[in-house]
């Protein structure tokens, strides 16, 4: 019999809780550790459609990157988004677990996966936060290299490899060769990225003034989308569970897609 606790141990051995940011919320956020699980559903977000899909496919556990609960919950009722989701999970006997910034920072996690997906070589951790039990450095941002190329060519590769509808970018006036990556909202790290000698930074959720600042400091800044830069890690979660718990049925959400879209020109 596979339990929620068995799944927690498999995933949090890979991405221990001590790797998370202090403000973050990770772990089993709804459900019982001793509950039996035969089927899990993996998705980036605990969106309503994902929870409904879990019920429809008979999953007893939903595993996501982003947490169901960020702020303290003062009540569980149908008047708030978090309350409605928690009620739905409890009423349908479904547990919810997530790995967030611990998975961002872990060796082999979000940002190593992003670097690999984009074809970076000589990948290293920028400003390691520490070392894990195996002596490997962990931390948020990854740096690496690609063969020297124009920014437009690299942007085209990013779009293709991440299946983006397009990217937003600021041209720092440099060829692309030394690249930093930070899945999700990591543009606040760009000064550290530039100081490390990188000419290009791939991340998401970039603000207007950050594009302006990047161009002025000579850094190519690429916003490839929050969903697109983080979603590849779902395959890592699936692989871990299939290797560690072979009796478990592991499914990827078919309903969860990037909620942002590009509207056609009129």
Image (tube, rainbow, N blue to C red):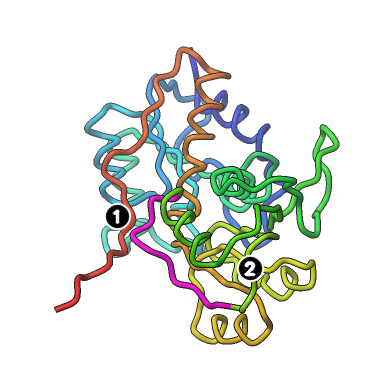
Per the image, the residue denoted by label 1 is 84
Q: Is residue 203 above or below residue 114?
A: below
Task: Kindly identify which numbered label has been placed on residue 31.
Answer: none
Q: Which mark is residue 175?
A: 2
Residue 114 position, x and y percent, is 57, 48
Q: CA distance from mark 1 to mark 2?
A: 49 Å
Q: Secondary structure at mark 1?
A: helix
Residue that appears at 26% across and 58% down? 78
User: At 31% from the left edge and 57% from the top edge, which residue is drawn?
Assistant: 77
Q: Label 2: how many residues lie within 10 Å, few (<14), some (14-19) or many (20+)?
A: some
Query: Badge 1 local density, few (<14 within 10 Å), some, or many (20+)?
Result: some
From the viewer's perspective, tell me whether residue 226 is left or right of residue 214: left
Q: Magenta segment, principal secondary structure?
A: loop
Mark in the foreground, 1 or 2: 2
Which quarter of the rendered picture does the C terminus lie within?
bottom left
Left or right of 221? Residue 97 is left
Instruction: List the single residue furthest toward the left.
Output: 266
């Amino acid at each position: 019999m596979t339990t929620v606790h068995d799944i927690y141990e498999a995933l949090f051995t890979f991405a221990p809780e001590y790797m998370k940011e202090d403000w973050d919320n990770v772990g089993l956020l709804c459900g019982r550790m001793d509950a039996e699980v035969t089927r899990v559903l993996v998705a980036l977000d605990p969106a309503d459609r994902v929870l409904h899909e879990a019920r429809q496919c008979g999953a007893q556990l939903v595993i996501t990157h982003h947490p169901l609960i960020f702020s303290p919950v003062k009540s569980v009722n149908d008047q708030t988004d978090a309350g409605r989701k928690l009620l739905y999970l409890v009423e349908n006997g479904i547990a919810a677990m997530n790995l967030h910034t611990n998975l961002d920072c872990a060796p082999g996690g979000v940002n190593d996966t992003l670097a690999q997906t984009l074809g970076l070589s000589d990948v290293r951790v920028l400003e390691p936060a520490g070392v894990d039990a195996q002596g490997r450095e962990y931390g948020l941002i990854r740096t690496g290299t690609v063969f020297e190329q124009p920014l437009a060519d690299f942007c085209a590769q990013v779009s293709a490899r991440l299946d983006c509808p397009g990217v937003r970018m600021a041209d720092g006036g440099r060829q692309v060769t030394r690249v930093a990556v930070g899945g999700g909202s990591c543009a606040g790290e760009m000064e550290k990225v530039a100081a490390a000698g990188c000419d290009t930074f791939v991340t998401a959720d970039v603000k207007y003034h950050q594009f302006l600042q990047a161009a002025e400091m000579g850094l190519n800044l690429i916003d490839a989308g929050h969903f697109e830069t983080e979603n590849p890690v779902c395959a890592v979660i699936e692989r871990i569970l299939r290797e560690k718990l072979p009796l478990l049925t592991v499914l990827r959400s078919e309903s969860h897609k990037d909620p942002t879209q590009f509207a056609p020109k009129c």
